[in-house]
Image (spheres, helix red, strand yellow):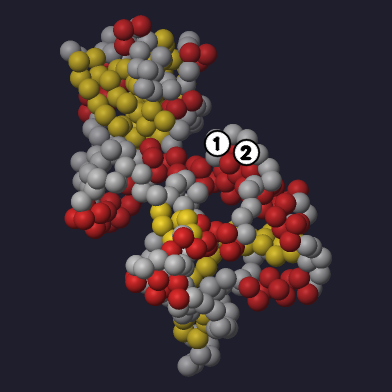
Amino acid sequence: MAEPLGELARTHYCGELRECHVGRTVTVMGWAATRRDLGGVVFIDLRDREGICQVVARPEVSKAAHAAADRARSEYVVAVVGEVEARAPETVNPNLATGKVEVLAREIRILSEARTPVFPIEDQIDTHEEVRLKHRYLDLRRPALQRNLRLRHRVSMEVRRYLDEQGFYEVETPVLGKSTPEGARDYLVPSRVHHGSFYALPQSPQQFKQLLMVAGVERYFQMARCFRDEDLRADRQPEFTQIDMEMSFITPEDIYGIIDGMLAELMKAAGHGEIPLPLPRMKYDDVMSKYGSDKPDLRFGMEMVDFTEDFRASAFKVFRSVIDGGGVVKAMNAKGFACATQGQIEA
């Protein structure tokens, strides 16, 4: 049976424990990731949002804690009171940040029991996406997704800090508004009060932020929720969040400087270190000529090279007809493919 939390209060997250905590009495809470019974000594890998720590339940230390640990199963919610001990050198786990210590349990409370989960709560799983989405609360327990949520939070906080220093106000604009011409279809919400009329969810806060500029706010931003009623594509979703900004009394150089600075701060917050500023700039014509796209991946090494002049006098009709019609002839150097067969190239 589950027990109440009572007067227990967490003192540390599981992933925080280090050698400097050895000798301290701590209270940790989380989910039982794994449980192992090795000759009467029960080990529980306890997981919370910050990481995993190993809990050891020995009957000679506390029979009640040992009995509770023996009853625990995967994904049981558990509270543990115990002392942090250094692990023996041969039992150190170098793959865990907490791998040099463990918690010797004096008290274990099972706060909530759980059925066996439908898939393992770990990063390397081969589970169909529909199953993961149906049990999203389980999928979100996985360490990789916990890290994603934490990174998103840190990036959002860094955006707010940086733009505040640049003189921006964060303003929430309405979500329910009048339909306006945009690049996609609106999501419509029927009005209960005005029968036959509909609200439109915003594709962007474009008109609202322009009103703010006219009103004299001068610098505005928000983490704007945007909605577009269209099919999924690689770069388009029905709903998404964007860092939305608007400024008055500025030049293009002002915009470049603010965006460059923000990206540099975000890369640092995400753990990628310093990046040199200003960021490289490319002209639209040059980008389209080299990559054929206005949003190229610069890691892609096969830039297009213009051979129009080389083939202008060519007898090869395919190229000559294109050039005579005002077109261009370009090629990419696909290194390592000189010996590829036609079938391999098409594949």
Q: Which picture quadrant has residue 210?
A: bottom right
Q: Position of residue 243 (x, y in %)?
A: 60, 58
- In the depicted structure, whether residue 22 falls above or below residue 169: above
User: Residue 133, image x and y in percent?
Assistant: 30, 55
Q: Nearer the viewer, residue 36 or 51?
A: 51
**Amino acid marked by disc 2:** Ile
Mark 1 and mark 2 residues within 8 Å of each other at the beta carbon: yes
- Side of 78 relative to 273 (left or right): left
Quarter the N terminus occupies: top left
**Front-most of residues 169 and 279:** 279
Which residue, given by chain and number where applicable, does mark 2 sit on? 275
Question: Which residue is at a point 58% across and 64% down the rendered structure image?
Answer: 285
- Residue at image x 53%, y 73%? 203
User: What is the secondary structure assignment of the residue under circle 1?
Assistant: loop
Return the residue at label 1: 272
Residue 32 horizontal side relative to residue 300, left or right: left
Report which quarter residue 177 is drawn in. bottom right
* Above or below, 205 relative to 123: below
Q: Amino acid at mark 1?
A: His
Which residue is nearer to you in this view: 67 or 259?
Answer: 259
- Is residue 107 visible to the viewer in this orientation of the structure? no
| Residue at (32, 26) in percent of width and height | 45
| Observer able to see residue 256 | yes
Q: Which residue is at a point 54% across and 79% down the rendered structure image?
A: 182
Q: Residue furthest bottom?
A: 196
Residue 199 on image: x %, y %:
52, 82
